[in-house]
Structures are given as structure tokens and as C-alpha cells.
Amino acid sequence: MNTAKLIRRFNRFRRNYFMDRRYGAFIGGVKKTPYPHLGAENTANIAYEELPPVFQGVVRPKEVLVDVGCGKGRVLNWWLDNFPGHRMYGIELDDDIAAATEARLRKYPVSVEVGDIRLLAPVDGTLYFLFNPFNAQVMAGFLETLKKRAASLPEDLPSPIQVLYYNCLHLHVFEADPDCQVTMIPMPPRFHRAALIKVG
């Protein structure tokens, strides 16, 4: 590994560490999911530096933010720092991780809920963030839930429902549905692919 790459990794770790600590604890590392049979992927943390280009110019007034598969809550941390005043949800299938995230963010205006997003998608959710939380089969079910939510979204909230999908391995689920409009988001070369999807 060359020196430039080592320096970049160190700086990335340092930024992640100090931002995590601002919201209670360092939350790096990967946790193997106990629910692979339910289509869940392992819990991994996005780096804070990856989030600004994904969210640039996307969050609307009164947006209700939902982190699907919120894990240890790094995206929730970043939202609290960048979108104060917006309602926020974290939905997590792993009850142990959800409990730790809820306890760490207890004093902040975030609702962390445990369970399957296909059942728990908030009726007022308007922007959903995905960091490849589950397989294509679950993604298809999630999309059907979103379409139902879009049909009954409260009138005082922004519409249509938006999905920001980062590391979008199952983007074909949305691309194949005529109710979805998919736009790729330009990302720096070293980051994953990202897409903005409008549902309904």
C-alpha cells in the first residue's frame, strides 16, 4: 500500500472517530448479521465523507428521513449534524444493535425501531436511505411497501417519496418498475455507486 493511500485511510478513520465520539461512542467495525436467512446483510458503517455527495441538493423542506438498516447509527449521527429539525427514523432488524443505537441516541430527536422495514416503513417517511441492507427479494417487498406509503402520504409532506440507494447492488428492482424514476448520482471514483429513486 502506498503512502498516499495510508494517509487517506488514516484521515478517514480520524474523521469517523471524532464524529462518532461527538454522538457518544466510536461505532466502527462490521458485525455479522444473525439474520442471513431473512435476506439481511452484515452491519457495516459508511464513512462520513461518503455522505455529502449522496445527499447534496436532495433533502426538501419538511423531509422525514428514514435510515433503512440503520445499524450502529452513523448516518443518523450525520443527519443530526446536517439536517436539524427534520424528523428522523432508524429501522434495524438486529435487536441488539438497535438497542445499542437507541440507547446512544436517546437524548436526540431520533426514533429507532426494531423489525422488518416492509412492515415498519413510517407512514410519514418521505426520504429513505439504503446502504445495501438486504437482498433483492426483500428489496422488492420494500418497494411494494413504499408504493403503498406513497399512495397515502399526508398532504403536508413533500412528495414523491425519495430513496437514496448507496452501494446499489439491487438497483434493477427499481429500474424494472414503471412507478420508479431512477437517476444515478455522480460520485467520486473511490466511492460506491449511488442512485436517487422517486417512487409513485
Image: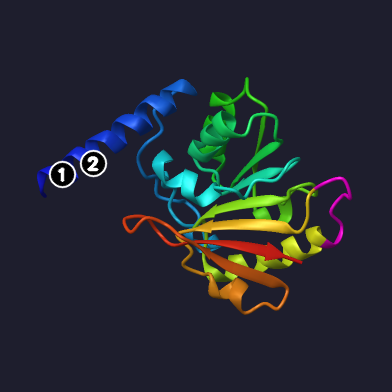
Secondary-structure class at tag 1? helix
Front residue of this view, candidates 101 and 197 = 197
The location of residue 89, given as percent across then percent down, is: 66, 40
The amino acid type, in three-letter code, at marker 2 is Arg
* Image: 18 above or below 1: above
Residue 163: name its quadrant: bottom right
Relative side of 95 to 19, left or right: right
Residue at 46% x, 67% y is 169
Residue extending farthest left = 2
The amino acid type, in three-letter code, at marker 1 is Ala
- Residue 19 visible to the viewer: yes
Q: Which residue is mark 2?
A: 8
The location of residue 4, given as percent across then percent down, is: 15, 44
Residue 180 is inside the magenta segment: no
Residue at 42% x, 27% y is 19
- Residue 47 visible to the viewer: no
Front residue of this view, candidates 173 and 184 = 184
Q: Which residue is mark 1?
A: 4
* Image: 36 above or below 50: below
Residue at 57% x, 25% y is 103
Secondary-structure class at tag 2? helix
Front residue of this view, candidates 84 and 56 = 56
Q: Residues within 10 Å of mark 1 (few under 14, many from 20)?
A: few
Q: Residues within 10 Å of mark 2 (few under 14, many from 20)?
A: few
The region drawn magenta spans: 151-157
